[in-house]
Amino acid sequence: MALSDGDVQKQIKHMMAFIEQEANEKAEEIDAKAEEEFNLEKGTLVQNQRLKIMEYYERKEKQVELQKKIQSSNMLNQARLKVLKKREDHVRSVLDEARRRLVKSVANVSLYKEIMEKLILQALYQLLETDVTVRAREADQELINDIFPSILVKYKETTGKNITLRLDTENFLPAETCGGVELTSSGGRIKISNTLESRLDLIAQQLVPQIRNALFGKNENRKFLD
């Protein structure tokens, strides 16, 4: 049976409505899919950026912590150096006081004669030469000439040998030194310094660790004493 134009128009409208509904549903499905993918991508980007920011601030925190440790170590080292300098200054002041006392001992002529005799004999026993020149301060010439005879006797009694001693009257020890002597032999090739300063320096090298312990106590961080 033939359809009237009205029926045809109705079917066409019905089909168009169906197609339009299908298209709308498909469009909604595409929009939903796109929204889901967008949210996933956005979430991934946000998470990546969040991790990057966290890593950045973690590095910053570590850098700040490292800077604090370096600064603290530097300040501690500076404090230790200041303490060590103060200690060395104090030890030096003790040695300076010892030098001042040496000067006072020289003022005691009888004591100084005895010291000079022992210093010369000690150097002679080290040299064991038969011809020795003694160098001293210009102010000590008379004193040394006075003790030469006694030194020659004692040296022979100890070694059984005679020795020639001469006083250097041209090259003197500096007048500002505390005193003592230098002995030379073999044309000056062999020399022994037995000045009061050299003796004090030698004793100081041996006793400075003991002086430090006496002044500041034992260093617990030090494993070896040599």
Image: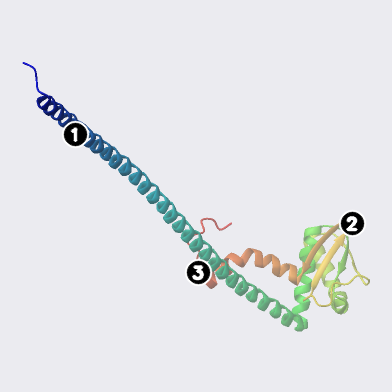
Please provide percent x and percent y for residue 32: 23, 38
Please provide percent x and percent y for residue 83: 55, 70
SS at circle 1: helix
Q: Is residue 147 above or below residue 36?
A: below
User: Which residue lies under the disc numbered 1?
Assistant: 25
SS at circle 3: loop
N-term mark: 1 or 3: 1
Residue type beneath disc 2: Ser
**Mark nearer the viewer, 2 or 3:** 3
For residue 155, what is the image quadrant?
bottom right
> How many angstroms separate mark 2 from mark 1 (CA)?
121 Å
> How many angstroms separate mark 2 from mark 3 (CA)?
47 Å
The answer to which of 43 and 188 lies nearer the viewer is: 43
The image quadrant where one finds the N terminus is top left
Given the current orientation, which residue lies at the most extreme left position?
A: 1
N-term mark: 2 or 3: 2
Residue at 62 percent of width and 73 percent of height: 89
User: Which residue lies under the disc numbered 3?
Assistant: 217
Residue at 56 percent of width and 58 percent of height: 225
**Mark nearer the viewer, 1 or 3:** 1
> How many angstroms separate mark 1 from mark 3 (CA)?
92 Å
Please provide percent x and percent y for residue 51: 36, 47
Image disc number at residue 186: 2
- Residue 162 seen from this side: no
Please provide percent x and percent y for residue 11: 12, 26
Q: Is residue 129 above or below residue 79?
A: above
Crowding at mark 3 (Cα within 10 Å: few <14, some 14-19, many 20+): few
Residue type beneath disc 1: Glu
The answer to which of 129 and 79 lies nearer the viewer is: 79
Residue type beneath disc 3: Gly
